[in-house]
Image (cartoon, rainbow, N blue to C red):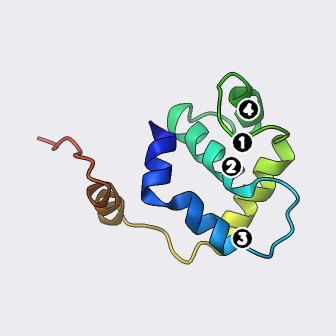
Amino acid sequence: MFGRLWQRLGIGDVLEEVLEGRQFGFAVERAVFVGRLHRLLVSGSDRDCANWMADYGIEGVEGLALHHFFRAMAWQARNSAKRASPGQVVNVFKAAGIALPHRP
């Protein structure tokens, strides 16, 4: 489900475009995806991300190790133009056609 949402929103494509010409030597887009997914589902230590990932059949993550996640997250933090406001996050879901439950 999260992989399809990532695809549908074009996040991987945007990352690949931004990363074009960079020589990281590992799948940065996949490391960012797994890092975000880990935070969303587990909300535990980033250090456990590589171990957690091994328990799931996530496509394209072969060879990723803990230091790859740290490098990908450091790159992402340096290159984030701005933080999204809660309203922007909701708009991303609306753009993808995903209905969020209303709060009472």
- Taking depth in this image into account, of 98 and 84 the one nearest to the observer is 98
Residue farthest left in this picture: 104
Circle 1 is placed at which residue position? 60
Residue 29: horizontal and vertical position, in percent? 67, 56
Instruction: Determine the CA span between mark 4 and mark 3.
Output: 25 Å
Disc 2 and disc 1: Cα gap in Å? 7 Å
Amino acid of disc 4:
Asp
Q: Are marks 3 and 2 in contact (CB under 8 Å)?
A: no
Q: Amino acid at mark 1?
A: Gly
Circle 2 residue: 30
Quick one: label 4 or label 1, which is nearer the N terminus?
4
Density class for disc 4 (Cα within 10 Å; few <14, some 14-19, many ≥20) is: few
Disc 4 vs disc 3: Cβ atoms closer than 8 Å?
A: no
Q: CA distance from mark 2 to mark 4?
A: 16 Å
Residue 90, percent from left and from top: 30, 57
Question: For the N terminus, which image quadrant?
Answer: top left
Q: Nearer the viewer, mark 4 or mark 3?
A: 3
Mark 4–mark 1 Cα distance, whole angstroms, equals: 19 Å
Classify mark 3: helix, strand or loop.
helix
- 2 and 1 marks in contact (CB < 8 Å): yes
Mark 3 vs mark 1, foreground winner is 1
- The three-letter code of the residue at mark 2 reads Arg
Mark sitting earlier along the chain (4/3)? 3
What residue did someone put label 3 on?
A: 19
Within 10 Å of disc 1 (Cα), the crowding (few <14, some 14-19, many 20+) is: few
> Which residue, given by chain and number where applicable, does mark 4 sit on?
48
Q: Position of residue 54 (x, y in %)?
A: 74, 26
